[in-house]
Image (tube, helix red, strand yellow):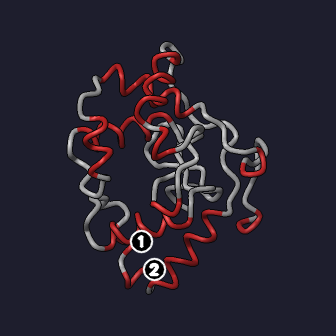
Amino acid sequence: AACHRLEGWGMKDGTFPMLAGQHKNVIIKQLADIRALNRDNPTMYPFALPESIGGPQSIADVADYISKLPMNPTPGVGDGKDLAKGEKLYKENCVRCHGDNGQGIPEKFFPRIQGQHYKYLLRQFEWIRDGKRRNANPDMIKQIKNFSDDDMRAVMDFVSRQKAPKELIGPIGWENPDYN
């Protein structure tokens, strides 16, 4: 909660991603990858290691809780300058794994990217493209290896504006009742 906020909404500046509404399987995989040191995320190490979070059931419980939090209704977005290009690139390169609206495929551990903060998406996309994120899907690495920085900015701006279903989005100003 200290980093991802009490609501799980992360930060618009991209420092911390929104976790609320993410697929449970995706959260479990990412925590497991961090725990196994397959994903470089030193900030998360104290929270993902067995002595801090417990065993597999603890990870499943945390993931289940986070996945049920309502998503931020006003995520951080890009400048909106090249949304048509972003949409075209998304439809040509991303739909197969992330779905027509960025909803992801939990059974394949493909994350929900709709409504995620633009600056976080941009950083992760760049790290995947440039080989810095070690737990990236090899198919995605191949798919985006030739994206220019402009391509990357356009597609991530488009993605950040994709809306989750209304039932997954919290009201503006929502506060987590578990912490009030």
| Residue found at x 46% / y 60% | 108
Write down the quadrant of residue 142 in the picture: top left
Image point (68%, 60%), residue name: 69
> Of label 2 and label 1, which has the lower sequence position?
1
Return the residue nearer the eye: 162 or 39: 162
The residue labelled by disc 1 is: 47
Which amino acid is tagged 1?
Phe
- Assess whether mark 1 and mark 2 are in contact (beta carbons under 8 angstroms): yes
Residue 45's place in the image compared with 110, above or below, is below
Left or right placement of residue 41 versus residue 169 in this view:
left
Where on the picture, by quarter, is residue 144? top left
Q: Quadrant of the N terminus?
A: bottom right
Identity of the amino acid at label 2? Ile
Q: Callout 1 environment at 10 Å: few (<14), some (14 to 19), or many (20+)?
A: some
Q: Residue at x 38, y 83 (%)?
A: 50
* Left or right, 67 with reference to 119: right
Q: Tell me: residue 127, above or below residue 89.
A: below
Depth check: give the residue in front, 104 or 127: 104
Find residue 11 and report its horizontal and vertical position in percent.
Answer: 53, 44
Q: Position of residue 175 (x, y in %)?
A: 74, 54
Q: Picture coordinates of residue 39 (x, y %)?
A: 29, 61
Please provide percent x and percent y for residue 17: 49, 49
Mark number for residue 53? 2
